[in-house]
Image: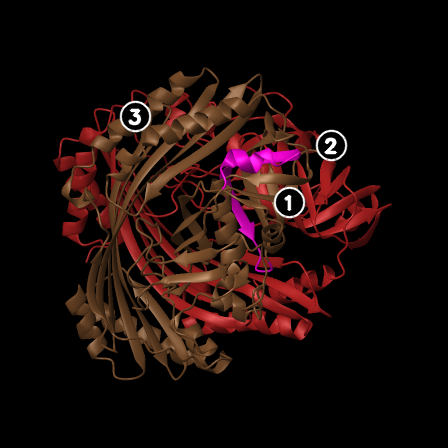
Chain colours: A red, B brown
Amino acid sequence: MMNLIEVAEFAVRESERFSVDEAEGFVQKQRVVEIVLERGEIQSERTKTRQGIGVRVIRNKKLGFAFASSLNRHVVQKACRDAFKLAKVSPENPDWVSLPLPKKVTSVPEGLYDEALANLSPKEILEMAIEGYEAVKKTDPRVSIDDGKLSAFLTEVAISNSHGISLQDRGTAISFFLVCIAKEGGETSSFAYEYDVSRTLRGFSAERVGEIAAKKALASLGAKSVESFKGEVLFSPDVAAEVFFGPVVSSVNADNVQRGRSLWADKIGENVSDPKLTVIDDGLLPYGLGSSPFDAEGVPSQRTLLINNGVLQGFLYDSYTANKANTESTGNAIRSSYSSLPSISISNLLVEPGTKSLDELILEVDEGIIINRFSGSVAAESGEFSGVAKQASYIKNGEVKFPLKETMISGNAFDSLKNIVEIGKERRATMMNVYTPPILVRDVNIISK
Amino acid sequence: MIELLENSVSRFKEGYVEMRGHSRRVFSIVVKDGEVERITQGLNRGVCARILIDGSWGFSSTTIINRESLLELMKDAESLAKSSKPVKRRFVKIAPVEPYEDYYETPMKRDPRKEDLEFLIEDVLEADKEVHSYSKNVASSSISISVVDDDLCFVSSEGAKIMQRIVRCFGGASVIAKSQGKIASAHESIGAQMGLEVFEETPIRDAVLEAAKRAVRIVPKRVVPGGYYNVVLENKIVGLLAHEAVGHTAEADLVYGGSFLSNKVGQKIASDMITLVDDGLLPRGFGTMKYDDEGTPTERTVIIEKGVVKRFMHSRETAIQFGVAPTGNARAWSFEYDPIIRMRNTYIESGDQTVEELIEDVKEGYFLRGGGGGQADFNGEFMFTIQEAVKIENGELKESYRGASISGNAFDVLKRVTGVGKDFAMRVGICGKEQPSYVGIGGPSLKTELLVGGGYR
């Protein structure tokens, strides 16, 4: 049995036996344990073992890709043959230059692999989920769990290409989320969401998730509605990540820029937001959720300044879009699994924190709302967002008055970025790999029945 | 593969065990702006074991398939079942189901396994060319086509031995229009559970052009003003309402958890114009299967009949809890997931009015068009995205607006239905409930009232 890097190298050699110009093998092996909570009960526990290979070949600027869920020699050989067959029938892409050339991987961020986490038994992981579950019940009997999931991952990757890239890496991650609901005298709260996510066991606490989720659910009991108005909205880190940084991530994606899908395509050096906003993509962040020594094509990870004091500085590239723009890849190729080709994404998107605490931000609001969960849609390209403000409360004269129901918000993320009143100081790692503090924005439509 | 599974199952002596083997062949093409972004061919194959010992489930899956790895798999599942037992509140029992031995295959005229799929590349490239020549305001398009060909086998310690081959062909198009610094997008999809003939019957180019027309039409427009309105919901949106906002509340696991429909069997909760069905046998339905992933035969389950709640959707586990027969709704996305209660093809039945007739009766309101995604909580509160809102004044269609999200309580919206169209249409969907699932969603256009979360008036 070959190890992962041997399989990746084998795939490159096998592909090269056909008359291809370039080949790449990406091998992934994963062990996942999941504990699923549903309706206040442990619904299922699973262990998953998965492995597979994705083979990318290029012949006369024509691309072919095939994958398989086995690392058996014959299966890998068949994947190479399939990829070659597809490359033959694929139309030529005149923009194709080359797969990445090897570059020295100089820094390996710390905190991406945790031996203790890798060695947890399914039973121990189950016990952690129970801690979260018990914490909800202990916090308040009016609260119940709607659903939740604890997942622990051990992932190993290996990547090799015709130009001599040959790299391997391993990492761990653990995540837990809960959705809770509180009931009192026939009234049901809105669904409260809380989570923790980490590369290591350091600081990870399922118990804390349970406590906070329960408290959030309780806080939304007694909801009222208000008349429609235009006002200030204080976005929690999760909502800010989804509503504002979804469109930002889409607009700095070089592929979108090159395809006319980004409103920021010709805005480098221009103001795209309030000067209080500075945003960096950092693939080398220690303990970072999206950190890795190299990306999914074997290009070393780096820090890329995207917005500096409101001025757009740059875009995120993989090797294809970088070649097309005659620049260098920023190491932002990602693959969700061996079965997908690389595409551009953020590693860790870091929003520079401001100086004010959440309480100080609330004090600044004359009339507005604070929103902790958003159930709606965000058009990444146009920035238009609209949806229901869940886990939201009404603020008047610097004071949180009451929780809201049947309230929607709508606006445009790109306008809102220019209407930032304050950025808070408490930055949080969200499930989207966006690290952001809460953000206070003026002039958002708040709509009610 | 089936012999290997039978062999492993037969070695297990304690409790109930089922094993599923699943091979998924995927062929997909993505074309963006004249370039083939990807052509992919692949095979994912794996096996799982689910074991019920002493009222507790354990589950394990692997892509490594040989005698030894399957023994390890059983051990893993067994140890999870035993170690989770003390923390489980409920002692699981499962309703009896006859152990079938059967083979089922998606009825199709053009079997993708018997054809070279390369011709699809031409189809997509041509559609791409056409969309870019449609208008100078078309800035970008993305078109995809997929053929997903599943071989499923199910073996249980009760003696079931079922093989099914399910073929799904589908595609999607998203078009971005740009004009005077403004940008707007529109999406359309095609597909069904059938062979390659689906691409002849509903060509991808028609879907792309429809999306292009809409994107170009709405790019100069303002977002629809927010407010509570009389609306006509286009059929494409109604399927989402049937599935997402109503259907989920009739899944027995959610009913058990206290969803809107719990304790409401026999009660009138919608206009008597509304009959809502979850159908596992609908020809061409994206969610159609002869047997579910617990080996239970599927059926046509009437959930709401003329506004009255009739039945819920069940797995073997919830059926015995509720004292009813299982409905064949236990489905798993892949070998990496245990089966849970999922919808199959969920729709509201047709009425007898044309869309023009529905609009005619509206004095002031909007015709909401173009399905998007959506979310709902199990109390019936929903939020959906619509692509376009066309103003209705005195029964006539006026100017178009960009879409926004719509929201409300589904049962409130269904109570207020005053007209049901006859323009029944099914769409393909992928539903997420911890794991994804291919589902069919459908219905006719409806006249009702709801909250539109658009711009400030």
Q: Position of residue A188 (x, y in %)?
A: 68, 64
**Residue at the far right in the pictured view:** A397
Q: Which residue is mark 2?
A: B457
Q: Are marks 2 and 3 in contact (CB under 8 Å)?
A: no
Q: Which residues are magenta?
A: B353-379
Of A57 and A101, the residue lying toward us: A57
SS at mark 2?
loop
Spatial separation of the CA atoms under disc 1 and disc 3: 40 Å
Q: Is residue A198 visible?
A: no
First in residue order: circle 1 vs circle 3 = 3
Amino acid marked by disc 2: Arg
First in residue order: circle 2 vs circle 1 = 1
Amino acid marked by disc 3: Leu
Label 1 or label 3, whichever lies nearer to me, is: 1
Mark number for residue A310? Answer: none
Q: Position of residue A35 (x, y in %)?
A: 46, 67
Q: Are marks 1 and 3 in contact (CB under 8 Å)?
A: no
Depicted A6 relative to depicted B456: above or below: below
Spatial separation of the CA atoms under disc 2 and disc 3: 43 Å
Q: Which residue is mark 1?
A: B450
Q: Chain of mark 1?
A: B
Image position of B105 (left or right of B171): left
Residue B361 position by quadrant:
top right
SS at mark 1?
strand
Residue A230 position by quadrant:
top right
Mark number for residue B125? Answer: 3
